[in-house]
Amino acid sequence: MPRRASDGLQLHRAVRGGPFAAAEQVDFGCAASLGEAAVTSAGRVLVACVDKGDGQESGRVRVSEAGPGEPLAPTGELGDGVVPERLAVAVDDDGRAVVAWPQLASRAGPRYRERAFAAVRQATDARFGAPVALGRAWSAAEPRLARLVPGGGALVVWRASHLDAPAKRRVALVVTRLP
């Protein structure tokens, strides 16, 4: 936890069986932001956070990574109009990764305003691929879980909801496979 909001999102890492190390700044663009982290069995860490920018219109997902014992370093910026809600991430020891987030689809009216998006990276030295819409627009789209599939690709589980009539809500749990 940061001591002040200006400290931003921080990460504490520990070696197996050891104490936590000093806090590392994740990304100064993600001051007082939510974040999601994934750690591999070999100790590689990936952290994604939302840079709210000038508001919801320009929010982006910032990704930072590190190998065991290495300092965090920025490795990508994803999305545009990212909604500062829940993220889902996964990474493996080969550097494959998936990041999922909710993004504004439309500002017109309360219905069909968010879509879930994800981007996949195939190796440590590669860049994240183009963001892929995981389905149609909903009133709210919230990634819940991201996993890499052995042999390639990824799965993202996300929650979609519509607000139809007052106090009437339709909710679906959706699983999307990415190549």
Image (tube, helix red, strand yellow):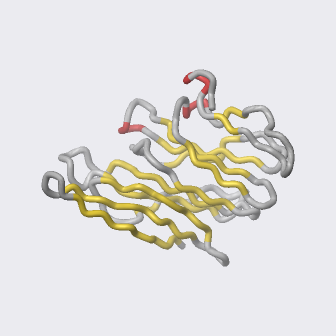
Residue toward you, 116 or 157 = 157
**Residue occupying the far bottom of the picture:** 151
- The answer to whether 91 is drawn above or below residue 45 in the figure is below
Left or right position of 43 against 139: right
Point 54% across, 73% down: residue: 179
- The answer to whether 147 is drawn above or below residue 75 in the figure is below
Residue toward you, 35 or 101 = 35
Left or right position of 109 against 11: left
Point 72% across, 34% down: residue: 24
Residue toward you, 56 or 4 = 4
Left or right position of 161 against 91: left
Looking at the picture, how far across and down is residue 161, in whole percent?
30, 59
Count of marks overlaid on the render: 0
Left or right position of 65 against 154: right
Which image quarter: residue 92? bottom right
Looking at the picture, how far across and down is residue 137, in whole percent?
30, 59
Looking at the picture, how far across and down is residue 40, in whole percent?
74, 59
Point 86% across, 45% down: residue: 18
Query: Which quarter of the image is occupied by the N terminus?
Result: top right
**Residue occupying the far left of the picture:** 165
Looking at the picture, how far across and down is residue 41, in whole percent?
78, 61
